[in-house]
Amino acid sequence: MQVIAKRQGLGPGFKLSHNMIMQSSNDEDEFSDEDQLSHEDQFSRLRAAHTLLQAGIHHTVWAEYAMGIAHRIPISWTLFNLELLVSPYDLTRAAHLICLKHPYTPIDVRRARYWEGNPKPFSPLSTVVLRHRDYPDCYKANEPPDIYLHTASTFHFDIHDPRLTTTHPCPPNEASGRLLYPSLLAFCNSIIDTIHEPPLPFYHPNFYSNWLGFLDFLCGYAVGEKGYYTKDGKLIGTCERLLQEIKEENRPFLSRLFYDIGNLPLQTSAFERHLIKDARW
């Protein structure tokens, strides 16, 4: 994976894609600990999160930084933009505080580099994008080029439920140990929920493929064995446990990923989830 990233000159608009993960499944460097972010780099990249922590603004570190730091996924080469989940009541305050304490300024979400092209997958009512005022020199200061502040409901996540969050397994300092990240189970549920119920009510192919890539890479490293979910035709034990614990309506989708039998068309998969949820009630 690291080799692919360097060869393609990936920058802050890069997102993990399902195809890249599958193409690189035999890459010897894919699961190297050398790709994990150093403690010094973690603290530098998460300064904005520490500012919110000090101000008492409840939040959760999201997306690549959650994968790379809390879940020890070796993706340091993809850690560009920082994404944080906050309460809708704290969205404006959090943005103002970060811009006050750090060299960032708000930009129109339609100018975001989440990926190239239009339309963008987020609403300006639920996502605020802050751009570093010294871009691209921000890399010299080891700071994210963009910070995305999302309301937690954008990703169907409850940041106030302690059962859904975890902390740094080996924090560089006491303050870093208080930052919250999604637990593995909650992360997987949120990704599958958001794939089927995206922030804006339309199918966005990049949003779908990139978050599917997140799920594949997260599970492949956290519960799989070097990217494999089965052995001799049977699920690996850790994968089986995750499949049993995940929400009932998300189980078929994750099962198809684990058994590598391909995804249903999104509309069909969404209908399947609704049938399971309706049957429960």
Image (cartoon, rainbow, N blue to C red):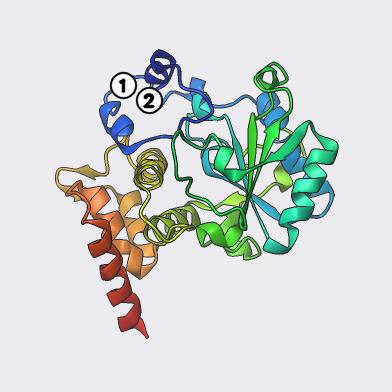
Q: Spot the residue most to the bottom.
A: 281
Which label belongs to residue 27?
A: 1
Residue depicted at 23% across the width and 53% down the height: 256
Say which element carries label 2. Answer: loop
Q: Position of residue 193 (x, y in %)?
A: 42, 61
96 or 41, which is in the foreground? 96
Which quadrant: the N terminus?
top left
Image position of 255 (left or right of 96): left
238 or 100, which is in the foreground? 100
Which residue is under mark 2? 30
Q: Mark 2 near mark 1, Cβ–Cβ under 8 Å? A: yes
Q: Identity of the amino acid at label 1?
A: Asp
126 or 111, which is in the foreground? 111
Say which element carries label 1. Answer: loop
Would residue 162 be visible to someone looking at this image? yes
Image vertical order of residue 247 relative to residue 236, above or below: below
Q: Position of residue 195 (x, y in %)?
A: 39, 55
Q: Position of residue 210 (x, y in %)?
A: 39, 41
Which quadrant: the C terminus?
bottom left
Image vertical order of residue 228 relative to residue 142, above or below: below
72 or 119, which is in the foreground? 119
Which label belongs to residue 123?
A: none
Total marks drawn? 2
